[in-house]
Image (spheres, grey):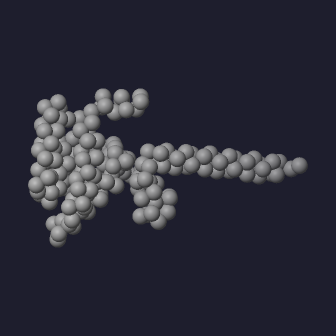
């Protein structure tokens, strides 16, 4: 066989190997994103229209989040926020609509102190989705109810649901690194 045929075969094999490596790496990245983001992955795929665009968005979120200086709360701040949450939760019984608004403000305040940008809700939710993907859908739902409440009358059951959603994120935001490592071991 002439040498040029061997060269063509070698190039074809090399292209095949490179394609397989890229496909394997792409699948591994997709699996990692699916595992890390859970339901948020599916929501982003649905919103973006296809997996490739969604994965690009999720990777961009990770890069943006990694540039942030997210820090744990001091023990005093942690205790102060926990006390304030209990007060807001108690107030929910008599004044659910104002308690939902207070819950929204308190969550935003904790996020600000931890180092998350809080100027734009969509950015807040995107940043939170990287660290707390299991509760970001709850956060969006709570915020939507809070906005609907400001525009008109929202029923007590919806307010209760919003409050429960805010509490889920609030609890995650107050977790310390010690709590996370203990949870990972369990």
Q: Is residue 29 above or below residue 186?
A: below
Q: Position of residue 55 (x, y in %)?
A: 46, 54
Q: Is residue 6 visible?
A: yes
Res. 56 image quadrant: bottom left
Q: Is residue 172 left or right of residue 80?
A: right
Q: Residue at x 18, y 44 (%)?
A: 110
Q: Is residue 74 above or below residue 87?
A: above
Q: Is residue 121 visible?
A: no
Q: Position of residue 42 (x, y in %)?
A: 45, 57
Residue sticking out furthest to the bottom = 152
The one nearer the camera, 100 or 157, is 157
How many numbered badges does the structure rendering display? 0
Q: Residue at x 21, y 65 (%)?
A: 155
The one nearer the camera, 91 or 133, is 91
Q: Residue at x 31, y 48 (%)?
A: 128
Q: Is residue 161 above or below residue 168?
A: below
Q: Position of residue 179 (x, y in %)?
A: 31, 31
Query: Split into 4 quadrants, where in the image is the C terminus?
Result: top left
Q: Residue at x 34, y 55 (%)?
A: 137
């Amino acid at each position: 066989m002439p040498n040029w045929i061997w060269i063509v075969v070698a190039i074809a094999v090399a292209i095949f190997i490179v394609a397989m490596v890229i496909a394997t790496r792409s699948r591994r990245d997709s699996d990692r994103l699916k595992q890390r983001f859970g339901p948020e992955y599916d929501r982003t795929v649905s919103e973006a229209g296809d997996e490739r665009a969604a994965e690009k968005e999720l990777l961009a979120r990770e890069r943006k989040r990694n540039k942030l200086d997210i820090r744990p709360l001091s023990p005093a701040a942690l205790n102060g926020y926990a006390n304030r949450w209990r007060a807001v939760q108690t107030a929910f019984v008599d004044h659910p609509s104002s308690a939902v608004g207070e819950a929204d403000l308190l969550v935003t305040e904790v996020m600000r102190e931890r180092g998350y940008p809080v100027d734009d809700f969509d950015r807040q939710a995107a940043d939170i989705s990287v660290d707390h993907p299991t509760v970001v859908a709850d956060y969006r739902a709570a915020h939507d109810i809070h906005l609907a409440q400001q525009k008109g009358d929202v029923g007590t059951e919806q307010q209760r649901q919003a409050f429960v959603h805010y509490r889920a994120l609030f609890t995650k935001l107050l977790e310390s690194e010690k709590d996370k490592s203990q949870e990972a071991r369990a």
